[in-house]
Image: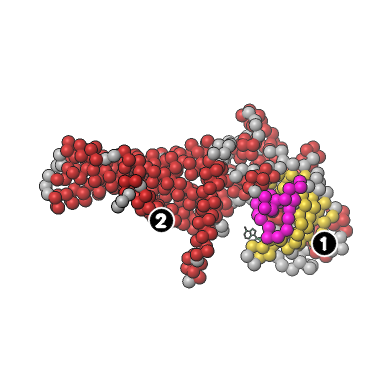
Amino acid sequence: MIRINDLHKSFGLNKVLRGINLHIQSGETLAIIGQSGSGKSVLLKHMLGLIQPDRGSIIVDGVEICGSSETELNNIRRKFGLLFQAAALFDSLTVAQNVSFGLERYRDLSQEELQKKVKESLAMVGLQGVEQLMPYELSGGMKKRVGLARAIAYEPEIMLYDEPSTGIDPIRADAINELIIKMKQEFRITSVVITHDMTSAYKVADRIAMLYNGIIVTVGTPEELRKSDNQIVQQFIHGRAEGPIKEW
Amino acid sequence: MTLLTKSFSFRLILQQVGEVGLLLGRTIINIFRKPRETKIFLQQLEEVGVRSLLVVSLTAAFGGLVFALQTYVGFHRYIGVGSEAYGGPIVSLGLTKELIPILVGLMVAGRVGSAMAAEIGTMKITEQIDALYSLGADPIRYLVAPRTLACLIMVPVLTLYGDIIGIVCAYFFNISMGVNRIVYMRNTLLYLELGDVLGGLIKAGTFGVVIAIIGSWQGLKTEGGAEGVGRATTRAVVISSIIILVLNFFLSKAMPESFGI
Ligand SMILES: Nc1ncnc2c1ncn2[C@@H]1O[C@H](COP(=O)(O)OP(=O)(O)O)[C@@H](O)[C@H]1O
Ligand SMILES: [Mg+2]
């Protein structure tokens, strides 16, 4: 479904990605773990063509993302739903307008169907009665959930979650884990979940990939990762300050 | 020093001209594409037009007054008492062809161009532009096209309004100085041609496009936090004001009435 080959990206002298190879299969949930600042969000944005790589390729459903025209890219992007790390809600629009943004423009829906869809999507993330609020009236966690509702409202084929549980209380975070699982089971959505919450990664992921120093150091099932003899992986999944990872 | 050499490097200027040209081209294409962003377009019409009325009224009124004052002084001193009534056509020509389009252009650049750069720039640094892309919405169609169209329409409308305010204020100034109102008015109407007013409006439309494109361009280029937004805002105003003043001269020169001068 998504194939990433030898992806390189630097910002000035800061070499963030140094040759990522990753294959995401249709219908699976892949978690990407790694330290803050290791380039997880940058990698995710490459998958949508929001950032152009210095080198390498990304192929989504047989279509090469790098070098596609803006029109082609926009068509590919409509297959994706992206939950931004900081929600990225449109701050001049109400919650309802945010959630219906994609639907309103690219689906032929009546006003009633649209309202119904907005309500449903908000209910899926555990929100109700917030349709007419503006983003600045919401708490951080609520913003994130509205961002999630906006992404799933469009019924994407591929969902990309950038730290879905960060900034959300543990109970709601687990509800979001359940939602990720439900999206996969009921709608056969392919998901990529970025997280540094290991509980969540173990719970939702079919496979976990670890990003370290600009490359994917391991990919495997949660079980394989637990048993990995890679010291970097062990240090990260057990959250230890001591080990081969020194910079923090 | 490095900053100076950097910003004056020929390659950089060429690259920026290219960026603006590309944005302009893509905006024009997107103005005709569907789905149309009617709601945003109407909001922008109000933002650019209605909310600029007060500023335009004031600048046009005092522009008209001071221009009438100097024309009056000129006739009074060099041609003689009684000749002031012939100032009417000069005032109206100067106002409609030059002063009002420029004043309105600069005022709207300050009011609206800066707001566009700040709004789009804030959207850029808070990833709302990326969010637009992620929903398959092209920011040029959603943000830049409606703003450009609104400015293309509203800056000429404001200019026409300013023309009227300016001419009326100049008239009242002359009356208050004891100029014969019938003669002044007749001279004005006799020599002011529709083409002059139209020429000013065409310029105003061009200024409108400059304001929207430069404001949006700076907004979309914004990087690095609140400071970046501030820089984009300032640049938008400075760059579009300079372009307006330079463009104004060449447009005046290119207008049919100025041929052969
Ligand atoms: N637009 C950008 N310009 C410059 N540097 C960037 C940009 N986006 C990300 N970076 C840098 O890339 C690195 C990885 O960032 P990010 O992907 O956000 O990390 P994380 O793994 O926490 O999501 C950081 O060092 C960050 O400073
Ligand atoms: Mg991140």
Whether residue B226 is visible here, answered yes or no, is: no
Q: Judge whether B22 appears above or below A117 on screen.
A: below
Residue at the image point whose x is 75% and y is 51% from the top: A59
Q: Residues within 10 Å of mark 1 (few under 14, many from 20)?
A: some
The label shown at residue B118 is none
Residue at numbered disc 1: A234
Q: Position of residue A209 (x, y in %)?
A: 79, 56
> What is the chain letter for disc 2?
B
Residue B47 placement, left or right of B141: left
Q: Nearer the viewer, residue B127 or B24?
A: B24
Cβ of mark 1 under 8 Å from ligand 1: the answer is no
Residue at the image point whose x is 39% and y is 43% from the top: B202
| Amino acid marked by disc 2 | Ile
Please, which residue is most extreme toward the front here?
Answer: B260
Residue at the image point whose x is 51% and y is 60% from the top: B14
Q: Position of residue B207 (x, y in %)?
A: 41, 48
Circle 2 — which element? helix
Q: Nearer the viewer, mark 1 or mark 2?
A: 2
> What is the chain letter for disc 1?
A
Residue A222 placement, left or right of A197: right
Circle 1 — which element? helix
Q: Please identify the quarter of the rendering in which residue A189 is found.
A: top right
Spatial CA distance of label 1 from label 2 is 60 Å
- Check residue A64 for magenta coloring: yes
Q: Position of residue A75 (x, y in %)?
A: 67, 43
Q: Position of residue B216 (x, y in %)?
A: 51, 50
- Check residue B208 for magenta coloring: no
Where are the magenta residues, as a range?
A46-68
Residue at numbered disc 2: B242
If the image is split into quadrants, where does the C terminus of chain A sit? bottom right
